[in-house]
Image: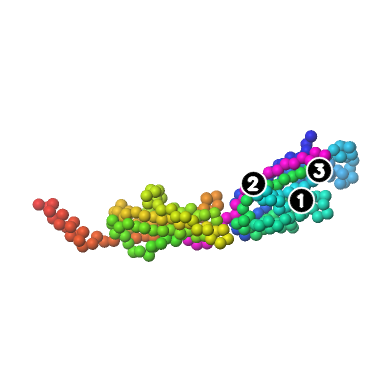
Amino acid sequence: MLGLKLRTVRIPTYKFRSESALLECQYELNGQRKGQRSKESVRRHHGYPSDHTNESMEDEEKLYSIKWYKDNEEFYRYVPSAAQPIKSYKIEGIRVDPNHSDGTKVLLKGLTLKSSGVYRCEISAEAPSFDSVQGEGRMDVIYVPKDGPHISDGERKSYQIGETMDLNCTSGRSYPASTLQWYLNDVLVTDPNNIIHYPSVHNQHGLITTFLGLTMVVNHRHYIEGTMRIKCVASLSPVLWRGGQESIVQWEQPAIDNRIAMLLGDKKQCCNY
């Protein structure tokens, strides 16, 4: 018995806010893939004699409905036998475009952050079998920061050897939260003693701002050819946002003050005896 089979469920993994998303649920009923016309149906359409009896046709399963759910809440129903086959229900974050939706696909328009969730399609056959198949997938709607990140204390001209450098990096608003990383002379800072983690701030509309601190005592190794370069990079998952954004501050090594120069000079003289 061929019956009802689920073939493919296509749900976008990631979408940007305000975009549209096409959800697809492909299935087979009595060995015929939905959306394709079988040779049998073509013969009947053109008036050719059928190789099957009416009795076998009556034994075939018929589609009853296709339902779509977001987080287990129904928002779309397709019932081919109904006077109005398509019916949608109001759910926060869901706007169905009925002109581009049917028995195998649903188009969602104007996505918001509340459109994120688990989507499931459920296909049911009519009596007597009442067969049912379903498939699901998760879609996350993301918002890429429009600006940032920003480094505080970036206006400072230089740091003396032995001074403690305290910097803060602030991301732009995003969803999900941006990940911040510090680089010193293009090398990732990984020492937990140099990194200060702060709680994220949740803004209106569900957007998130993240913060990361950097603290370290400046020594001569931090200056390469007289320059120290500090960079803060904000990124979402590489799958979501390949570009990333960065903020860079750069300081020239300050000249050794007169007292230190004099001590060095004295030391040099003492060694030339």
Which residue position holds label 2?
Answer: 137
Q: Is residue 136 visible?
A: yes
User: Quick check: 220 left or right of 202?
Assistant: left
Determine the CA span between mark 1 and mark 2: 19 Å
Earlier along the polypeptide chain: callout 2 or callout 3? 3
Q: Which of these two is toward me, 144 or 92?
A: 92
Determine the CA span between mark 2 and mark 3: 25 Å
Quarter the N terminus occupies: top right
Q: Residue 230, image x and y in percent?
A: 38, 57
Which residue position holds label 3?
Answer: 126
Question: Residue at the spot x=56%, y=58% of the render?
Answer: 206
Which residue position holds label 1?
Answer: 78
Instruction: Name the residue at the top extreme.
Output: 1
Q: Which of these two is toward me, 72 or 180?
A: 72
Tag 3: amino acid: Glu
Q: Is residue 246 visible?
A: no
- Secondary structure under badge 3? loop
Tag 2: amino acid: Gly
Magenta extent = 127-148
Numbered mark located on residue 102 in the image: none
Tag 1: amino acid: Tyr
Determine the CA span between mark 1 and mark 3: 13 Å
Q: Is residue 140 magenta?
A: yes
